[in-house]
Image (cartoon, rainbow, N blue to C red):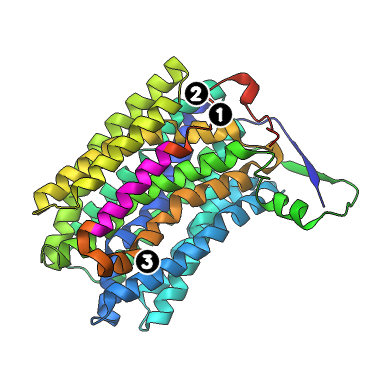
Amino acid sequence: MEEVKLIEPVKTPFKRLLAGILIGQGGQFLALMTPLMLILVFKIMEIDPQNFTVSYGVVTGLGALFAFFANPIGGAISDRTSLKFGRRRTWILLGSILGSASLLGIAFSTKLWMVTVCWCCAQMLFNFGFASVTALVPDQVDESHRGTISGIIGLVIPFTAVIGMVIMTIMGKATLHSKYGVLSTIAIITGIISCMLIKEGKVVYRPKEKEKLSFGGTLSRIYPNPRKYPIYTWCWLTRFFISMAYCSGSYNTIMLMQRYKLSQDETSKTVTILSIVTMLFLATSALLGGLLSDKFRKQKPFVVASTIVVGIGVGINIFAPSVTYVVISSIISSFGYGIFLAVDVALVARILPNKNDTAKDFGIMNIANTIPQSIVPFIAPTLLSIGSWPFLFGSLAIFALLSALAVIPIPEMSPKFIGDPIEG
């Protein structure tokens, strides 16, 4: 049954909204990405030391499946939440609290299936929160500022990755229970602070008359009709392909231990250094790209440039003879990905098909960013078995070039394209 929502015109002041988005999303990314980059591997090694690479791929692959469904479902639920507390704030808070509880479950797990269940729950619940945080951009940000806020939001992932790695390095000798406990606490606190900063109006629904829908019509309620809104699908593919290439870094922990024979302690320190260095380059390109995008009102040239640079960066790892080349690869690919992040959120907000389904459609779009973080570790063992490290990174570099092709059909910034359906 289709519903029309009426929203009381309540907007958060821009600086306050930006702080609320950064803190809320930052805390959730910190809690989810830090285990994915480092300590989830260590937990699985503790339980299954002989086959941890395969087990890690299975766990993250199943987690990716849950993330795949959780983001759009969470967004759709958020769109239709009519609590006085706010449709976005409700799920930012619940996602932070319940996702953190799932992380604690990983810390106390003694079997691989327990880790798998808890990780899938964490992926699902934090993705509920991600969908709500991201939807605040089209909800409350004017189009003239979306490039700037997109570039700033793009810093959340690398910045929180650095914080997470620094925390893990400081807690180097601490137990995994303590490390997961600290991450969970941070996620809950930042979720509460975010909700305190953000203002929202109440949502009211008025149902339309029931109508019979074909199977295709039902699917279009879930995913925007590709024939009517082809730009949405091209935008999703652009995101997905470049994320697949850039997420080659999610396999860095295992690569450093297996390819370069580093110990756990050496690996933790190296990943921390990589995070800090890459954040500086990503931050520079993201902020600069966002400002230039708003100034010149152009997005596609930035996306194409970013895909080429990311492809070059990932390609360096094909024949990287030492850790130094891994650092160089990370710097180049992060600089390119920062350019992409500078316009990514603004581009998506511009082409969303239906204002009544903002969080749901943004949630589906977010899948293109989040699921590669788990797909890459899942498929990496297979790619390695086919052609070792050169084949792994060569395959992932190709995805960056596919992203450049996918952006071609997307129109450049122009008022007549904003939200307009395009008949196929």
Taking the spot 30% from the left edge, 56% from the top edge, the residue there is 250
Q: Give me the C-alpha separation between circle 1 and circle 2.
A: 7 Å
Q: Is residue 307 above or below residue 44?
A: above
Q: Is residue 100 above or below residue 20?
A: below
User: How many C-alpha atoms fall within 10 Å of the one at disc 2: few (<14), some, or many (≥20)?
Assistant: some
Residues 242 and 134: in front is 242
Q: Tell me the element at label 2.
A: helix
Q: Position of residue 112 (x, y in %)?
A: 37, 81
Q: Give me the C-alpha separation between circle 1 and circle 3.
A: 36 Å
Q: Quadrant of the C terminus?
A: top right
Q: Earlier in the sequence, mark 1 or mark 3?
A: 1
Query: Which residue bears the numbered disc 2?
Result: 145
Name the amino acid type tagged 2: His
Relative placement, left or right, of 220 versus 131 is right
Q: Which mark is residue 378?
A: 3
Query: Which residue bears the numbered disc 1?
Result: 141
Q: Tell me the element at label 3.
A: helix
Task: Name the chief secondary structure element in magenta.
Answer: helix
Name the amino acid type tagged 3: Phe
Residues 68 and 231: in front is 231
Name the amino acid type tagged 1: Val
Which numbered mark, 1 or 3, is in the foreground of this view?
Answer: 3
Q: What segment is highlighted magenta in the picture?
A: 391-404
